[in-house]
């Protein structure tokens, strides 16, 4: 290992640490907010509206005098919950589809699953959200469904391609000789070996989900008031941006740092779990 | 090549039919009575009946779907319920904002990302590489609408170089129109540029590791010569695909960014239509955007096959 490789390796090792720390801070804030926030986020205090950061309100207050730190803590809950459930939907449906497609490669089933994937890819999460909202109205649940649907083909494709390379392995052949069926082999032998891939992709989709949730609630297609969400806070701050820039800056920083933390964690995990990539230095 | 083209065209046709059927199902069949959906729960029975007749809801869904698709093929998108104007006119008015915005952003991100990716790859492991890669980490993590708001704060409110929102209109000339699209395009381009830089860098590094590069070096070419003459051309193929794929994200992103800058584009149109329960407009805009995504990917596929003959055989 040359000195240059050592520096790169150290930078990557640190990225996992920094990423995990950031992720912990925001998940921690979300969990703490279930039991305690510095201020009640539904309490209006018009006398203290749009105050700049000060010891009483470390991140200032909004146009209703609500404490921005408290709102960011509760908003973390919304963002994390939406993105996490959406990853769950994507994995829950996408992984079995991918496993089935790989187990019956070249069959009609495989073809249908893959063409279905292509079709969903043509609908960005935002368009799915627009269609759902136009019919059922805006809510956090609809945002979850839209982002979740978008996640399905991502996991289906990844699982299929990971599984295809495993189906040619000797131990899978041995299992087939032993008389195990395709479904059993997929669950017992294929799935455990694509888990690493899924963990890394799950982290990435989690961070994309946070960004998507923020975007959807910013345009009013996600969580509705009074549920605090980072995107909503940014939308509310927009008309006040020249008077109270802190109302715009802090919720955006929260999104940026959470997404950055998850991305760094994903990169770090990939390096950790996939030695081949580590050697290639990417 | 001909067989490949026919196969691709068939699959394109199937995609478009299925996509339009999904949109039709979601927006016209699932909600039950579209007339009731548009008018809300307090609608009078007579008004409902009138609207049903106007929309042709007395006929079955298959006939309505055929009408809808047939109309779109000749450029007739129906009539907006709220504005009483042809949807095709409303869309035409908005496309002239959204499409130039997306293309402007695409141009910006490509112009920044390709040199940055090449630079980082050529100086792999150096401070430049780490710096560029660090910036791309930030670029993919920043919500672009927030970045847009920060730019408004700095460049419009404080420095007054740009207006905080609105569109000058093409009648005012290309200069002022492009000026009012500049901040939105930069915001839209940022995450795309970050992703593209990474793809460019890693594609170039992949190619630089190939045997033919070593052969070229062994024949006496310098590192720079092999990079420019041999590696770059091959590395551009995956970059091209990603540029195509990014188009769908640009369209989705444009819808949100238009909101930040109050631009009268398709995004604003679709949100107004949602709040006015104007499902015909929502349906048409969504179909148009999905059509654009499918077509762009189709063209990218063909370009890919033209560049790399192996692909024509393998599928």
Image: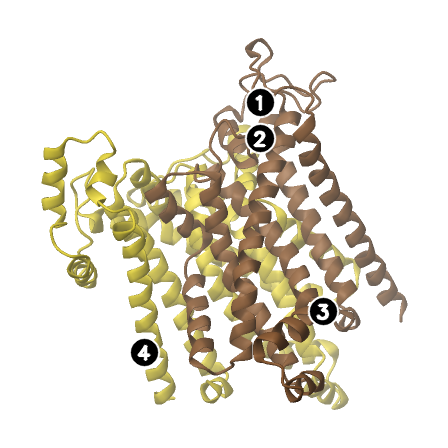
Q: Residues at badges 2 and 1 in contact (C-beta under 8 Å)? A: yes
Which numbered disc, 4 or 2, marks the residue closer to the eye?
4
Q: Chain of mark 3?
A: B
Residue underneath mark 4? B10
Q: Chain of mark 2?
A: A
Residue underneath mark 1? A244
Sequence-first disc among 4 and 3: 4
Measure how far apart labels 1 and 4 are at the Cα level.
Answer: 55 Å
Chain A drawing hue: brown
At 52% from the left edge and 35% from the top edge, which residue is drawn? Answer: B152
From the viewer's perspective, is B8 left or right of B68? right
Residue underneath mark 3? B122
For the colour yellow, the matching chain is B
Measure how far apart labels 2 and 1 are at the Cα level.
Answer: 8 Å
Identify the secondary structure beneath mark 3.
helix
User: Are labels 1 and 3 on one chain?
Assistant: no
Depicted B268 relative to depicted A278: above or below: above
Decide: few, some or many residues near mark 4? Use Cα within 10 Å; few <14, some 14-19, many ≥20: few
Depicted B307 relative to depicted B188: above or below: below
Identify the secondary structure beneath mark 1.
loop
At 62% from the left edge and 40% from the top edge, which residue is drawn? Answer: A255
Measure how far apart labels 4 and 3 are at the Cα level.
Answer: 42 Å
Answer yes or no: is residue B239 visible.
no
Q: Residues at badges 4 and 3 in contact (C-beta under 8 Å)? A: no
Residue B102 at x, y = what percent? Answer: 42, 54
> Nearest the camera: B134 or B87?
B87
Q: Chain of mark 4?
A: B
Q: Residues at badges 4 and 2 in contact (C-beta under 8 Å)? A: no
Depicted B315 relative to depicted B145: above or below: below
> Nearest the camera: A31 or B242?
A31
Decide: few, some or many residues near mark 1? Use Cα within 10 Å; few <14, some 14-19, many ≥20: many
Measure how far apart labels 4 and 2 are at the Cα level.
Answer: 49 Å
């Amino acid at each position: 290992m040359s000195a240059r490789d050592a520096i790169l390796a150290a930078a990557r090792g640190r990225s996992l640490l920094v990423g995990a720390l950031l992720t912990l801070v925001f998940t921690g804030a979300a969990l703490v907010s279930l039991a305690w926030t510095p201020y009640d986020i539904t309490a209006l205090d018009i006398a203290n509206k749009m105050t700049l950061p000060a010891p009483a309100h470390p991140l200032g207050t909004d146009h209703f005098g609500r404490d921005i730190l408290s709102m960011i803590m509760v908003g973390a809950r919304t963002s994390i919950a939406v993105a996490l459930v959406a990853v769950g939907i994507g994995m829950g449906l996408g992984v079995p589809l991918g496993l089935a497609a790989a187990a019956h490669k070249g069959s009609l089933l495989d073809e249908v699953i893959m063409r279905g994937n292509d079709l969903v890819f043509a609908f960005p999460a935002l368009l799915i959200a627009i269609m759902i909202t136009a019919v059922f109205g805006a809510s956090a649940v609809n945002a979850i469904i839209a982002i979740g649907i978008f996640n399905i083909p991502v996991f289906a494709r990844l699982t299929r391609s990971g599984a295809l390379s495993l189906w040619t392995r000797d131990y899978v052949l041995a299992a087939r000789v032993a008389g195990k069926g395709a479904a059993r082999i997929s669950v017992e032998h294929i799935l455990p070996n694509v888990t690493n891939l899924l963990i890394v992709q799950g982290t990435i989709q989690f961070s994309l989900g946070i960004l998507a949730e923020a975007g959807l609630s910013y345009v009013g297609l996600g969580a509705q008031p009074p549920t605090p969400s980072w995107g909503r806070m940014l939308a509310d701050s927009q008309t006040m941006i020249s008077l109270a820039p802190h109302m715009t800056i802090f919720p955006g920083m929260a999104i940026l740092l959470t997404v950055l933390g998850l991305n760094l964690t994903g990169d770090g995990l990939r390096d950790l779990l996939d030695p081949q990539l580590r050697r290639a230095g990417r | 090549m001909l067989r490949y083209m026919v196969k691709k065209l068939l699959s394109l046709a199937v995609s478009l039919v299925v996509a339009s059927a999904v949109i039709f199902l979601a927006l016209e069949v699932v909600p039950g009575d579209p007339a009731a959906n548009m008018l809300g729960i307090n609608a009078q029975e007579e008004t409902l009946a009138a609207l049903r007749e106007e929309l042709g809801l007395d006929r079955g869904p298959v006939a309505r779907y055929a009408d809808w698709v047939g109309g779109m093929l000749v450029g007739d998108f129906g009539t907006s319920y709220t504005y009483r104007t042809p949807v095709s006119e409303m869309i035409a008015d908005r496309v002239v904002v959204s499409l130039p915005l997306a293309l402007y952003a695409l141009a910006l991100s490509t112009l920044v990302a390709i040199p940055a990716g090449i630079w980082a790859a050529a100086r792999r492991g150096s401070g430049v590489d780490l710096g560029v890669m660090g910036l791309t980490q930030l670029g993919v993590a920043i919500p672009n609408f927030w970045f847009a708001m920060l730019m408004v704060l700095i460049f419009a409110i404080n420095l007054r170089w740009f207006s905080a929102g609105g569109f000058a209109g093409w009648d005012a000339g290309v200069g002022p129109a492009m000026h009012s699209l500049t901040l939105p395009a930069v915001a839209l381009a940022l995450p795309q540029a970050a992703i593209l830089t990474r793809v460019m860098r890693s594609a170039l590094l992949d190619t630089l590791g190939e045997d033919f590069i070593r052969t070229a070096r062994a024949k006496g070419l310098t590192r720079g010569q092999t990079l420019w003459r041999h590696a770059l051309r091959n590395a551009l193929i995956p970059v091209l695909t990603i540029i195509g794929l990014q188009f769908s994200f640009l369209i989705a992103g444009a819808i949100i960014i238009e909101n930040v800058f109050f631009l009268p584009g398709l995004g604003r149109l679709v949100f107004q239509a949602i709040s006015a329960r104007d499902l015909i407009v929502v349906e048409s805009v969504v179909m148009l955007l999905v059509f654009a995504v499918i077509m762009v990917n189709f063209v990218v596929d063909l370009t890919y096959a033209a560049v790399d003959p192996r692909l024509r055989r393998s599928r």
